[in-house]
Image (cartoon, helix red, strand yellow):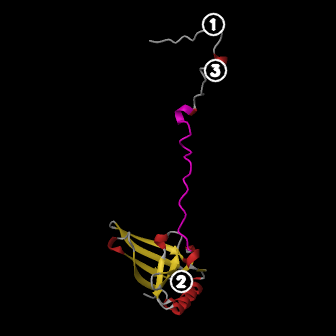
């Protein structure tokens, strides 16, 4: 597979594990990318600006190299071409980078996204709304108990 960067806009199909049928349709323009796929019968189109991509990466495969338009979300990354010719793929890598005005990302700089941090639950420590109106008392505080007095509780 090899896309021609000089013949934009392009429309092609790519492999997508999550999509119905395992295929997504990609429209590639100079300023934007449109991903169309169906997930569990629901059709969707995702319009992404080219500026939202991190760059054009070169990834090594078993016997070839692959060019990828890399996004922060790995499921939105787009394959641009696969070739076993090192000179051919290096020239295409530079052309794609120039057309999109994105940086070249060598294989070692492309990292998987970091695991999301768990933030503390701010609501868990909060008092319920009906208790906010009430003052919290301290019954066992010795300052609240007077000498020889008892509290009288009236019951019906």
Give the mark, 1 or 2, whose residue is nearer the N terminus.
2
- Secondary structure at numbered mark 1: loop
Distance from label 2 to label 3 (Cα)?
72 Å
Magenta segment includes 128: yes
The answer to whether residue 97 is above or below residue 120 is below
Q: Quadrant of the C terminus?
A: top left
Give the mark, 2 or 3, whose residue is nearer the N terminus.
2
The number of callouts visible is 3
Q: Which mark is residue 50?
A: none
- Secondary structure at numbered mark 2: loop
Q: Are marks 2 and 3 in contact (CB under 8 Å)?
A: no
Between 73 and 87, the one nearer to me in the picture:
87
Measured as percent of width and height from the top left, residue 95 is found at: 56, 89
Measured as percent of width and height from the top left, residue 34 is found at: 46, 76
Magenta segment range? 110-131
Which residue has dot 1 on it?
148
Q: Report whether 97 appears left or right of 155.
A: right
**Of the two numbered discs 2 and 3 in the rendering, the one whose residue sits closer to the viewer:** 3
Q: Are marks 1 and 3 in contact (CB under 8 Å)?
A: no
Tag 3: Cα neighbours inside 10 Å, few (<14), some, or many (≥20)? few
Distance from label 1 to label 3 (Cα)?
15 Å
Measured as percent of width and height from the top left, residue 97 is found at: 58, 84
Distance from label 1 to label 2 (Cα)?
87 Å
Q: Which mark is residue 141?
A: 3
Instruction: Report which quarter residue 111 is drawn in.
Output: bottom right
Q: Which mark is residue 30?
A: 2
Q: Identify the residue at image location x=46%, y=86%.
A: 64
């Amino acid at each position: 597979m090899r896309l021609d960067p000089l013949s934009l806009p392009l429309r092609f199909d790519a492999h997508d594990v999550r999509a119905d049928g395992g295929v997504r349709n990609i429209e590639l323009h100079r300023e934007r990318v449109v991903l169309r796929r169906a997930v569990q019968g629901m059709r969707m189109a995702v319009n992404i600006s080219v500026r939202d991509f991190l760059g054009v990466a070169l990834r090594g495969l078993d016997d070839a190299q692959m060019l990828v338009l890399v996004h922060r979300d790995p499921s939105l990354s787009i394959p641009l071409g696969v070739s076993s010719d090192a000179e051919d793929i290096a020239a295409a890598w530079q052309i794609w980078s120039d057309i999109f005005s994105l940086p070249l990302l060598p294989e070692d700089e492309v990292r998987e996204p970091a695991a999301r941090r768990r933030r503390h639950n701010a609501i868990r420590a909060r008092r319920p709304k009906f208790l906010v109106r009430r003052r919290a008392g301290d019954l066992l505080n010795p300052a609240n108990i007077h000498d020889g007095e008892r509290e009288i509780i009236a019951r019906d």
